[in-house]
Image: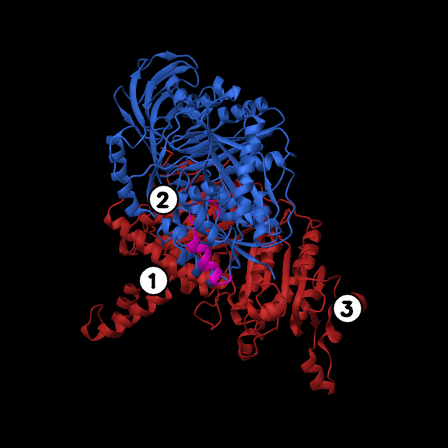
Amino acid sequence: MIMRCLIANRGEIASRLNRTLKRMGFFTLGLASYFDRTLPYVSELDFVIYRPDSDPKKIFLDEDFLVDICKKFHVECVHPGYGFLSESATLAEKLAQQNILFIGPSARALRLLGSKIELKNLAKKLNVPILETQSLHNLGQGTIRFPAILKSAEGGGGRGMRVVKNFEELNEALKLAQEEARVTKAGEVFLEPYLEKFKHLEFQVLVSHAGDITVLVERDCTIQRKFQKIIEETPCPALAEALRVQMQEYCYRIANYLKEPSIFTFEFLVSDQGCFLSEVNPRLQVEHTITEEIYKIDLVEIQTSIALKHAVKFPDPNAYSGSAMQLRVYAEDSLDFTPQVGYLTELNFPHPPSRLELSYRAGNSLTIFYDCLIAKLIEQAQERSVVIDRLLEVLKKVVIKGVSSNVGLLIGILQSQDFKSGTYDNNLVEAVLRRGINLVETPEDVEEMVRDLCNAKDQEISQFSSLPGLVVKVLVKNGEKVAKNQEILQLESMKMIYSIKASREGILELVVSEGDAVERNQLLFKIK
Amino acid sequence: MPYLSSKLKIDDEKKENFSFYLQKQKILIEALERATLTEQLDHLKKLNKLTVEERISKLCDTRLFEIGTLAGYRIYDNKPGANIRTLVAKVQDKFAVVIANDPSEKGGSYYPLTVKKHLRAQKVALDLGLPCIYLVDSGGAFLPLQDEVFPDKEHFGRIFYNQARLSARGVAQISLVLGSSTAGGAYVPALSDFVVIVNKQGRIFLGGPPLVKAATGLDIDPELLGGAEVHTRVSGVADNLAMSEEEGIQLIRKFIVTVEQKEKFKLNVISEKPPEYDPLEIPYILPKDPSRPVDSKEVLARLLDESYLEEFKPLFGSSLICGFGRIKGILVGILCNDGILFSESALKGCHFIQYCNKNSIPLLFLQNIVGFMVGAEYEAGGIAKDGAKLVSAVASCTVPKITLIWGNSFGAGNYAMCGRAYEPLFLFTWPTSRIGVMGGKQAASVLSIVKYGSADHPEGSDFREKIEQQYSVQTEALYATARLWDDGIILVEDTRDILANALTLCRYWTCDDNFSPSYRF
């Protein structure tokens, strides 16, 4: 009989998990809410359970709902992906009660590793360095060292973390955290010293049932904005071998103590004060892809095989080649990173990377219910500089219409000297933004602003606006003769000015005037 | 302006429309899930058999769409689907029609609607010259209903007639025998061009063990009578032996690569673009109350690539929108109702269809029609003959036609807009659609006039209510699809994909007819 596996996730990770699980022989089931119906992953899985009348968030966040689905459709195992309930001990337990396999570690490990405070206690016990928490009781003036960072004990992915530089900010942050704690399951909050300058390095750790523990080469995920990673690379371009070995030994020590078969990611913060274990994630990470590229392995297959108690052969940690990088393309405002919602009228990668993981396609809607990761661009090569060059080529040709994206920021980072040299730290993103980034992301953008209906020499052509905006300047008078590519008017749209040029020569017949607000596909002018 | 624009504002009324759509959708989805994912797995597990869903998913690389998934819904006791799954799929590099018996209930035997569904799938294969893959696992005719399954022309025997003639036309007939293939059913593999049979599981016999016992008094092991070994080594009724279902499916997949598939109808295709407006907004526009009008262009703006519609004769007969647009890059001639049909709209439609016939452009009929205009002025104006011209053009059309009933489909409007009887290549409906000879209220009024002399006669109030109730049930999309009056209820969200798939299949369509219809002027 074929085993049924429910992929309790959506978007690019659902597609990614489906590829491997189908290859391993599973019959894959998935879930979708109304807005997800036309996403790529829905047509890839064997059977998608569609719940348009359910709360879109609840579908992926309600343990009882998932267990009911599993029972109804005779599901034998569940892969939670990342985010959502991937670290839920409750889900693992409820599934175990129904004899359904949860692809991840045991509930015990999920509980222990899910609490950053519990983890710190464990690390201290095993002499692994951590950043000491500062007590939030008796907030006397002298006892707290700033700058500090307020974190919640549970919850991953950088949510709810706030840097505070003084008591006023700390009190503000505490109030907000209390508000959030009512809504999310974030658990208690704690305060940690904030390292002004650091690198974020993490290690993929594989633990088998037979007791084999392998610690692979690190991933450098220092490039973040609002504590969310946007660029990840492996290996770290500027890491002393001794420090690498030291951190790998710490990973081994903890994994050996836990004796939990599964795959884990151990995250460290490294500054000139040393290295500190920050988190251990008992699940697949968004950036697992780059480790796969340099080792030529399939981490989903390894993780699933461990869960199925099959014999697994781990790769040799030294058997990796070259360098790999992943860029996360998010739909967000380039400057303040507010997530964008909208309807994608175009999403195109004319020059695609060697590995492209897509969450959306043209015609899909991005909504407030889910995060706004559009795609992951992954490249691997022997030389790091080649990887960077290839990714820049990809980015420069990307076309995204309907929402704004962080492509401009990604280009700015990849082009910066600090990034190219590899000696960057967590302050690079801000530095790039201060220098200014090109908000008009691709040169083709400007040419794409007009649409003409026919190119025949003697016919009249009409030019339409392909964005809503305001006509801020008209440069040519009605009835005048214009040349091909002559600038006719300027359109302001989404904080950017676009220059609209004549697509051929002729006599201009203006339809709009200065000061007019225009809609998408509105006629601007004709050329006879 | 060829680019359609939208003035949609989401107010309370629109939100109610959306909730209504979700309600209808919920019932539909529940029914579809019961039809596709088997619930009783235990007895199949004991026999070590795959479920029909697993067989289909291993065989097909992509599924274009399923035909008649909910046949028998609320007619038979079984789960919806009438014991058979029929779909158009891509297997390796070929498009094929897959006809798979579902043995999970009543041994996969043929009810009247099972036969109708099997024949419908074969018709699709005939229209498009698509190879047929039969996943045979059925106990044969459902004996308690033999009078509705066996004797007539469009009954069980027709399956084999079609198969023989399809094969004779060069349309490959391929069988995988995964279970019982008894009596008449034995002709499915026997008439196939290529047969794979699964060891110790597939059985082919014209007369099964009970019949042999009754005729000769002998007890015989079914395996010895018609098992895989007998037919692949001795009789030659089957061609290849598979040791497991999976192996059998892989053999079929290897064989299909050798089947020839030629494109016969040229489509005009460019790169696809999404509509400018989100198709997911359509349920806000579909009115909860079927008697309310809808701005059809709001719907078209969310179905067509770039919301682009090159309208034909927009100022004339405006209650029928005719024009050209693309769905996922494929050029199609569109006829879409926007009100009731008048002489002008019928004439325009007729002219448009003729043009598309001459230029090999497939047609898409988007139905939301309650009928033709009534009244002395219009009858005297010749609305009957003008409607007839449109019906004539539709019936003698020489390009492939696809119909989507997205709203109402009543009376002669159904005919003029290419209803089931007019042989569209595929006919789909939306969950909120309705179909009938006329609306319930109208029928109640008419019958009340006949019986009581007036439409609102006080004695007739119960009578009218009963009629309205009856029509309310019989005009529902689920009622229609259960009886295979359409090829399936499709979700608004899936519509672009499914219509594009249907249009892509038009590449394999041929028309043997050379028509010259006469029009009454």
Relative image position of residue A219 (x, y in whole percent)? 53, 33
Q: Quadrant of residue B430?
A: bottom left
Is residue B381 depicted above or below A385 in this figure? below
Q: Nearer the viewer, mark 1 or mark 3?
A: 3
Mark 2 and mark 1 in contact? Answer it, CB < 8 Å: no
Q: Which residue is mark 1?
A: B438
Whether residue A312 can be seen here: yes
Question: Quick check: is A88 in the magenta stretch?
Answer: yes
Chain of the residue where label 1 is placed in the rendered structure: B
Q: Give the residue furthest to the left.
A: B458
Q: Secondary structure at mark 2?
A: loop
Relative image position of residue B92 (x, y in whole percent)? 64, 48
Chain of the residue where label 3 is placed in the rendered structure: B
Mark sitting on residue B140:
none
Q: Which residue is mark 3?
A: B229
Question: Which chain appears red?
Answer: B
Q: Secondary structure at mark 3?
A: helix
B65 sits to left or right of A177? right
Is residue B438 depicted above or below A462 in this figure? below
Q: In this rendering, do the residues under marks 2 and 3 share a single chain?
A: no
Mark sitting on residue A369:
2
